[in-house]
Image (cartoon, rainbow, N blue to C red):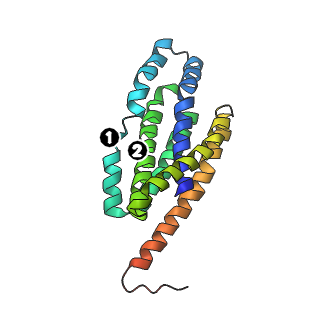
Amino acid sequence: FLLSFSLGATCGAWCSATFLQTVTRKAQAAGELPSAVEAFVVWMPFVSNATFVFSPCIGMLIDLQGFVPAVQILLAMVLSAVLSLWLLPFNLQWWTLLSLNCLQAVTYSLQFTYTARRYRVEQFGIIMGFTTVIQSVVNIGGLYLLTAPAGLAAAAFIVPTCFTCLMWCLKERRDISRLLPGHAVVG
């Protein structure tokens, strides 16, 4: 949970920090006017921070299906945000903003919901503080990646996020199977 959450949050911060410089570079390469980049400058704060659009959907999904689908969405949004920022041309960078919005919504929905459901009420504050500290440690890597080539940054986010999300999904499925009636737990 901690690493998946921290990687998702750091990926969102990295995408936000590198978005405008990447879009500007791509616009110049495509021969776009500076006013085209200004549209992203104006709309980025609104689009990338409108997590309230997706957060209720993530909460309902967790209520209905558990954490596994939300963790899979976290992985998909990390992939989408990083790869679209890196690979898509200038005119398709709106997809990056949408992906970034979804990434932030699922990341923080998972943080709050997982902590609230898996820990006692008395532990909530300390666990939330601990997750913030762990994310801050992971953010140090994100700071380095701000100056790294896009391909290296993409690999640095994608590989560990795939691994940690897979491990989290396997753990959640194992925990669910132990709760099913008539299931014999070995070991």
| Rendered view: 114 above or below 107 | below
Quick one: SS at disc 1?
helix
Q: Which residue is mark 2?
A: 105
Quadrant of image for the C terminus: bottom right
Q: Is label 1 in contact with label 2 (beta carbons under 8 Å)? A: yes
Q: Which mark is residue 83?
A: none
| Rendered view: 20 above or below 112 | above
| Rendered view: 35 above or below 159 | above
Res 7 visible: no
Q: Which residue is mark 1?
A: 53
User: Is residue 176 left or right of 81 when viewed as pictured?
Assistant: left
Residue 105 screen position, x and y as percent? 40, 44
Quick one: SS at disc 2?
helix
Residues packed near mark 2 inside 10 Å, few (<14), some (14 to 19) or many (20 plus): many
Q: Residue at x 51, y 16 (%)?
A: 32
Amino acid at circle 2: Ala
Query: Which quarter of the figure has residue 66?
Result: bottom left
Residues packed near mark 1 inside 10 Å, few (<14), some (14 to 19) or many (20 plus): few
Task: Tell which circle, 1 or 2, labels the residue nearer the N-terminal end.
Answer: 1
Res 55 visible: yes
Residue 184 screen position, x and y as percent? 45, 87
Residue 144 screen position, x and y as percent? 68, 36
Total marks shown come to: 2
